[in-house]
Image: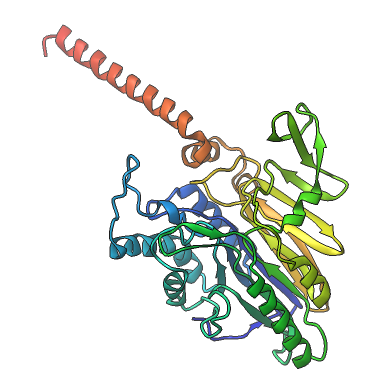
Amino acid sequence: MYKEKLKFNKDGKFTILQVSDAQDMHIPRKAMFKMLDKTYDKVKPDLIVLTGDNILGNHIDDALIGKKKSATTKPAVLKRMRKALGLLLDPIERRKTPFAFIYGNHDDMNIISKKEQAEIYGEYNFCVPYNTDDNSVECDTYNIPVYSSNGDEMKYNIWMLDSAGSDENGRPIFGRVQPETIEWYERKSRQLRLENNGPVMSLMFQHIPIAETAQFFKKCNADDKGAIKVGEDEYVKLDSTKAKGFAFEIEGNDEPDYGQLTAIKKCGDVCGLVFGHDHMNCFTGQIDGVNIIQTPGASFRSYGNMISRGTRVFVIDENDPTSFETYTIGYFDLFGNKFNSVLRYIFSADEYEKVKAVILSLSGVIVVGLIVYILAIFNLFGF
């Protein structure tokens, strides 16, 4: 694991790249990894945060074709998981960029526990230390200090909170930041306040959005731009007076909220609360003075669209840690609308499976037709 202090650069800046919902497997969709590679080289982040659904854990044991399970033992599933995580983590390690992780609802939907997965992350030299000693919370609940450019004092903090989990058989059992995690945050916040003679400003990352994001949506008509169907003859859309960005889905978690936002307001040290999970949503807004940031998914193996797929950048200034700059970088921002970029997208993106099948079928028909034509020519000339 990474042994060095994370510090602001000499120019006083610290850049975080958030990759959410990478959600791939041991046999990859290459378009996402090309997108991530180009993003890493463009942004040159000081820290990469992987904010859950880092692999498609509930399908890691699937057969290549069909619905059967082909990895039926723990060693077989673990082998696939190592390969899937290697595809995601090796490019980061090669660039010698520190990275941190949390889990989403898909990561442990299998027989490999969070702690066992964490050990794989921890084998990488640039993995920032995660929670290995506080059993009151999950291993992906921890904080990351960021020190001043001269390394003398803690100037910023990054909260990494667990927000989803499954049982030992991979069945989901919760999907919110749990009460014990909120209590841990409050304790740790008080500790940091005492140690640093005041609040240490921070960003807080988790996978599942808070229930209060429903406040960003308003009722609308079915034919309104951005309308999302939420029930029989019932539609909502993102309220542009409350949040900036776009949304193609709503947060559909029925689990109750446990008072996370109340705790954040009480502690007064979180500049922005950041999540993923909703692949096709990308917006920023405020609730009760707390900045709320929704980041779209990066995955090509899971659902998304041409607008949404990408990553999010945060830039923090050592001289003004109470604010931050944030922006997203999408696939087409990097590659443009060139023919080969669009073709790569179509052949990788989950929503184009039927289109790919038609293209491949037509290609097959054309190839067979050419073969028949060539054989007829050969026969005509007596070959």
70 w.r.t. 113: above or below: above
Q: Residue 23 versus residue 149: which sits nearer the camera? A: 23
**Relative side of 243 to 380, left or right:** right
Q: Quadrant of residue 290?
A: bottom right
Locate the C terminus and report the quarter of the image it occupies.
Answer: top left
- Side of 239 relative to 306 (left or right): right
Q: Position of residue 233 (x, y in %)?
A: 73, 28
Q: Is residue 300 above or below residue 118?
A: above
Residue 217 placement: quadrant: top right
Residue 332 position in % (x across, y down): 62, 44
For the residue pair 159 and 68, the one nearer the viewer reads as 68
170 or 246, which is in the foreground? Answer: 170
Residue 161 place in picture, x, y as percent: 63, 70
Left/right of residue 81 with respect to residue 178 in the rendered view: left
- Residue reaching furthest to the left: 382
Q: Position of residue 185 (x, y in %)?
A: 69, 77
| 133 lies above or below 118 | below
